[in-house]
């Protein structure tokens, strides 16, 4: 009688005291192999997680650097805007003084309609 891939029962399998040491040792070996496989799987997953974390930290550092660069750029643009507005007012006042009648203040000259 054949039971497929299974082995035939032995005399030890029917022993009242249970299987002997070799079967227990084989079971322990199988459990150890399974535990080693689980540990190896966990180590692989940990390595992948650490690699992802490292990439995320590098990306965060790059984004922080870009943010600081953009802040400096905005600051320079604000300084430039303030300077240009001041220069525009100064030139407007200078032109107003050149072309306005002496009795009329520049602000009134600029606000009057033609």
Image (cartoon, helix red, strand yellow):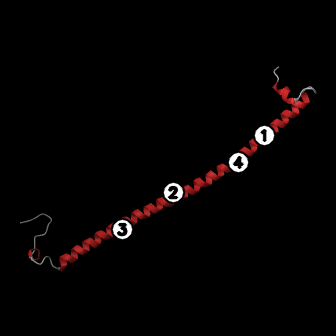
Q: Is residue 100 above or below residue 49?
A: above
Q: Which residue is mark 1?
A: 84
User: Nearer the N terminus, badge 4 or badge 1?
Assistant: 4
Which residue is at a point 64% across and 53% down the rendered structure image?
68
Q: Is residue 17 above or below residue 61?
A: below
Looking at the image, which is closer to me, 39 or 81? 81
Q: Position of residue 47 (x, y in %)?
A: 43, 64
Which labelled disc corresponds to residue 75? 4
Judge whether 86 appears above or below 23 on screen: above
Q: Is residue 58 left or right of residue 1?
A: right
Q: Position of residue 36 (x, y in %)?
A: 32, 70
Mark closest to the chain's N terminus, 3 or 4: 3
Report the side of 98 relative to 49 (left or right): right
Pointer 1 or 3: first along the chain = 3
Q: CA distance from mark 2 to mark 4?
A: 28 Å
Real-space Cα separation, disc 1 to disc 3, in angstroms: 66 Å
Query: Depth-wise, is mark 2 or mark 3 nearer the camera?
Result: 2
Quarter-of-image position of residue 24 = bottom left
- Identify the residue position indicated by label 3 in the image: 40
Residue 110 quadrant: top right
> Going 82% across and 23% down the picture, which residue do you hit?
112
Mark before the other along the chain sequence, 2 or 3: 3
């Amino acid at each position: 009688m054949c039971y497929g891939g299974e082995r035939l029962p032995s005399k030890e399998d029917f022993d009242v005291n249970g299987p002997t040491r070799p079967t227990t040792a084989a079971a322990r070996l199988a459990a150890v192999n399974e535990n080693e496989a689980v540990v190896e799987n966990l180590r692989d997953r940990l390595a992948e997680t650490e690699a992802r974390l490292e990439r995320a930290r590098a990306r965060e550092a790059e984004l922080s650097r870009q943010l600081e660069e953009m802040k400096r750029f905005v600051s320079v643009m604000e300084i430039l805007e303030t300077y240009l507005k001041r220069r525009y007012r100064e030139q407007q006042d200078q032109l107003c003084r050149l072309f306005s009648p002496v009795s009329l203040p520049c602000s009134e000259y600029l606000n009057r309609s033609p």
